[in-house]
Image (cartoon, rainbow, N blue to C red):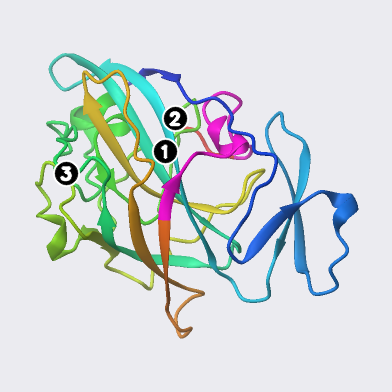
Amino acid sequence: MEQGGTSEGTHGAFLEDKTEYIGARSVHPEQVRNKDMRNIKTYIGLGLSSAVLASTASAEMTGRAFEVGYAWSGATFGGTTQGYVVDLYLEFTSGQDILLNVYNYNDINIGASYYQGLTASGWSPNLQAGPFETQDALEFDSFIAIGGVTEYSPDDRPYQMAGNGVATDPNFGGNGAAGPAANAGWYNGNPNNPLGRPGTGPIPEVVFMGRFSIENSDGFSLIGSTGFATFNEGIGTPGQQAEFEVVPTPGALALLGLAGLAGRRRRK
């Protein structure tokens, strides 16, 4: 079955004269002078200037979550639908971090009803096989994530995955809720499986947190949503907690789906 709905990115590249990180900061290569900087990495934004991300010795969340929003249309189990999608990504300063859970998440659009496909109902990842693997289940269905992406669309956007142990906590409102309730949370129920390790590539280290879609919508935003997350560096390392807020997307990530991410495996 040929997969892939049509989508159109609606966020331009957000460029700021000065970008500040928590636990790291972005600098021009000629300005690298601080003798306390360690593990300096260079990342090249897609179509952007080179920059240097200087990370501290101890891995941390930056306190920023990013949204990637786009219009979508495609096939359902018995027809077609269209609407708007917002994918959420949480930023870290090191590829060694592993996201374990999200808690006390407060959606800026609390009360909204997010799209649930007929063949992949519920907020936990729930992609089915065979004729139930529809375009909307792969690309438009709303679901939570602690990383764990295994396949991507031709636009380099995450496909929904089969059940992998990620589940809602009691504050979410239930797996069948219309949307996350106040102080909602979700978690990796199998911490021995490091689903939440950030990816690597020409963008800051991020972990996919979930997809939020509204049918027949021309656009919406999750900027201003807040929450907390727990992470560590693997089994036997201490857990750390930090707060995050959804903020405007930086240039490299805003181009997701336009130029694509290098090295991502696509569905054939």
Does the magenta segment cover residue 151?
A: no
Q: Nearer the viewer, mark 1 or mark 3?
A: 3
Q: Residue at x 85, y 51 (%)?
A: 29
Proximity of marks 1 and 2: CB atoms separated by less than 8 Å: yes
Q: Nearer the viewer, mark 3 or mark 2?
A: 3
Q: Residue at x 31, y 29 (%)?
A: 220
- Is residue 70 something that shows in the picture? yes
Check residue 179 in the rendering and tell me which mark sits there, or answer none: 3
Q: CA distance from mark 1 to mark 2?
A: 6 Å
- Is residue 3 something that shows in the picture? no
Identify residue for label 2.
153
| Front-most of residues 114 and 119 | 114
Are there few (<14), some (14-19), or many (20+) residues within 10 Å of tag 3?
many
Magenta-drawn segment:
245-263
Q: Which quadrant, please, contains the N terminus?
A: top left
Query: Residue 7's spot in the image, x, y percent?
Result: 40, 19
Query: Residue 38's spot in the image, x, y percent?
Result: 77, 70
Above-or-below relation of 261 to 167: above
User: Which residue type carries mark 1?
Assistant: Pro
Secondary structure of the residue carrying numbered label 2? loop
Secondary structure of the residue carrying numbered label 3? loop
User: Which residue type carries mark 2?
Assistant: Ser
Q: CA distance from mark 3 to mark 2?
A: 25 Å
On screen, residue 35 versus residue 177, left or right, reads right
Mark 1 or mark 2, which has the lower sequence index?
2
Q: Residue at x 32, y 23 (%)?
A: 219
On screen, residue 230 versus residue 141, left or right, reads right
